[in-house]
Image (cartoon, rainbow, N blue to C red):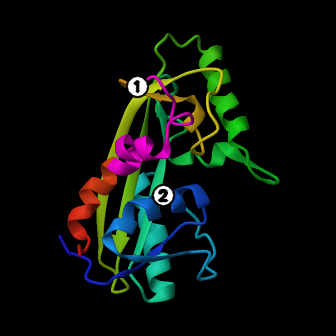
């Protein structure tokens, strides 16, 4: 595994929720982070059918354009009874003509489960793949998962995305209700970050 020696890193996302979570995970390491937005980068087309493929697209684009190492995150919700959907298309389910509406997306997921008369518990998992890419084209991948079930109605106004309908195993609060520090400890992103940590510099 190649290790990051620089103390500067571009977070290849325009998603402020993801940026906050990733920045919180990196802050104890003394790594200076900037975002794709800070560098005026566009969002590259995510044309792959896997989390790893799309993570690579975003990280390599940011590294090439900025000349700095870049970290991307591609993540999504996989629902057992929907054959793994929305999966890599998680953000697409929220798209509207005026940006992303995750209340709409969560309602769509639940409606499809109802139409299929999917039995309880309605199992699902969040998946996160980090890609750490360097300007010379090298990259490293790190995957994490968080298992749980879906609940309705939505619960909580914390977090982002599908968090208000996801109840992680062995917990009584959804990701949308949970204290951010607790979510950061058990989330799919935290699981992927635990693997990524071995590649990052430490003070």
Give the distance between the C-alpha atoms of the residues marked 2 and 1, in whole angstroms: 33 Å
Rendered location of residue 84, percent (x, y): 46, 33
Is residue 175 shown in magenta? yes
Q: Is residue 163 left or right of residue 134?
A: right
Location of the C terminus (image quadrant): bottom left
**Residue linked to disc 1:** 171
- Look at discs 2 and 1 and give the one toward the viewer: 1
Taking the image as shown, residue 3 lies to the left or right of residue 118, namely left
Q: Position of residue 81 (x, y in %)?
A: 49, 22
Residue drawn at (31%, 48%) of the image: 191
In front of the other: 144 or 25? 25
Q: Residue at (40%, 25%) from the top-left corner? A: 171
Relative to 75, 146 lies left or right: left
Q: Residue at x 53, y 13 (%)?
A: 118
Q: Quadrant of the N terminus?
A: bottom left
Q: Earlier in the sequence, mark 2 or mark 1?
A: 2
Few, some or many C-alpha atoms within 10 Å of disc 2 (few <14, some 14-19, many ≥20)? few
Magenta-tinted stretch: 171-190
Q: Quadrant of residue 90?
A: top right
The residue beneath circle 2 is 48
């Amino acid at each position: 595994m190649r290790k990051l020696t620089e103390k500067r890193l571009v977070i290849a996302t325009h998603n402020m929720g993801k940026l906050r979570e990733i920045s919180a995970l990196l802050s104890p390491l003394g790594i200076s982070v900037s975002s794709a937005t800070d560098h005026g980068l566009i969002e590259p087309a995510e044309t792959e059918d896997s989390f790893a493929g799309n993570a690579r697209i975003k990280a390599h684009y940011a590294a090439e354009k900025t000349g700095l190492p870049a970290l991307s995150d591609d993540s999504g919700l996989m629902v057992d009874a929907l054959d793994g959907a929305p999966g890599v298309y998680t953000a697409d389910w929220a798209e509207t003509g005026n940006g992303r509406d995750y209340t709409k997306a969560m309602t769509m997921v639940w409606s499809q489960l109802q139409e299929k008369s999917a039995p309880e518990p309605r199992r699902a998992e969040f998946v996160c793949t980090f890609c750490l890419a360097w300007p010379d084209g090298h990259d490293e991948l790190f995957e994490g998962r968080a298992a749980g079930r879906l609940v309705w109605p939505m619960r909580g106004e914390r977090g982002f995305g599908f968090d208000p309908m996801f109840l992680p195993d062995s917990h009584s609060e959804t990701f949308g209700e949970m204290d951010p520090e607790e979510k950061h400890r058990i989330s799919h992103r935290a699981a992927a970050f635990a693997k990524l940590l071995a590649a990052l510099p430490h003070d």
